[in-house]
């Protein structure tokens, strides 16, 4: 068994060890997203574009839902939940686009990934809340609930693709590659 290589062997370099530990090339996500390996950054941006489309539809439907709840003597709490969710979705659209296009540091991409997962779970709760609600227009409640479920699934897929290709999205060099910077250094000295 001397010819069996493991990640502990000296024949592997440090990046190969990191890839082995993360499961790159071996995991189910690598197989699922193998067609995206040629353009990982473009794949993440296209997935975000589809997510933005559903966010806009959901944003409009949230205010339609408030109007139908208002006519049908719906709960004030659900009206507030609809408006609050619309605001959260709009904020996600702006924040996500800014992070992916202008500020893709390791911290911001990780923060955004966590936020996507949290908002996805919020959409699942909205689906459960509005799906069986009888006040207002039942048809509008079902459309709103199904859009929330759709956004839950789309956010989940986006979180998977962003998590898988996060190394391709982050453009800032790591601190270890820059070297050390004096604590009293100016911004210009740190940027070099």
Image: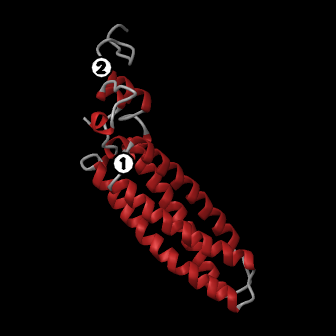
Q: Is residue 37 left or right of residue 72?
A: left
Name the residue at 38% across, 17% down: 6
Q: Earlier in the sequence, mark 1 or mark 2?
A: 2
Q: Is residue 156 left or right of residue 1?
A: right
Reading the image, the residue beneath label 2 is 13
Name the residue at 73% across, 84% down: 74
The image quarter containing residue 48 is: bottom left
Label pair 1/2, CB-CB below 8 angstroms: no
The kind of secondary structure element at disc 1 is loop
The image quarter containing residue 25 is: top left
The kind of secondary structure element at disc 2 is loop
Name the residue at 61% across, 75% down: 83
Q: Is residue 157 left or right of residue 1?
A: right
Reading the image, the residue beneath label 1 is 104
Residue 130: x and y in percent read 67, 74
Residue 54: x and y in percent read 45, 71
Distance of mark 1 from mark 2, alpha carbons?
Answer: 27 Å
């Amino acid at each position: 068994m001397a010819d069996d290589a493991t990640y502990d062997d000296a024949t592997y370099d440090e990046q190969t060890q990191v890839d082995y530990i993360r499961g790159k090339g071996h995991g189910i996500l690598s197989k699922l997203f193998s067609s995206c390996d040629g353009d990982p950054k473009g794949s993440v941006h296209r997935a975000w574009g589809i997510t933005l489309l559903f966010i806009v539809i959901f944003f409009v439907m949230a205010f339609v839902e408030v109007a139908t709840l208002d006519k049908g003597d719906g709960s004030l709490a659900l009206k507030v939940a609809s408006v609050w969710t619309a605001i959260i979705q709009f904020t996600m659209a702006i924040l996500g686009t800014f992070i992916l296009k202008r500020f893709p540091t390791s911290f911001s991409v990780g923060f955004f990934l966590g936020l996507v997962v949290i908002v996805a779970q919020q959409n699942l709760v909205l689906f459960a809340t509005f799906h069986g609600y009888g006040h207002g227009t039942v048809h509008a409640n079902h459309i709103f609930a199904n859009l929330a479920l759709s956004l839950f699934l789309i956010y989940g897929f986006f979180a998977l693709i962003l998590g898988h290709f996060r190394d391709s999205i982050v453009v800032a060099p790591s601190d270890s590659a820059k070297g050390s910077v004096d604590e009293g250094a100016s911004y210009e000295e740190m940027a070099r």
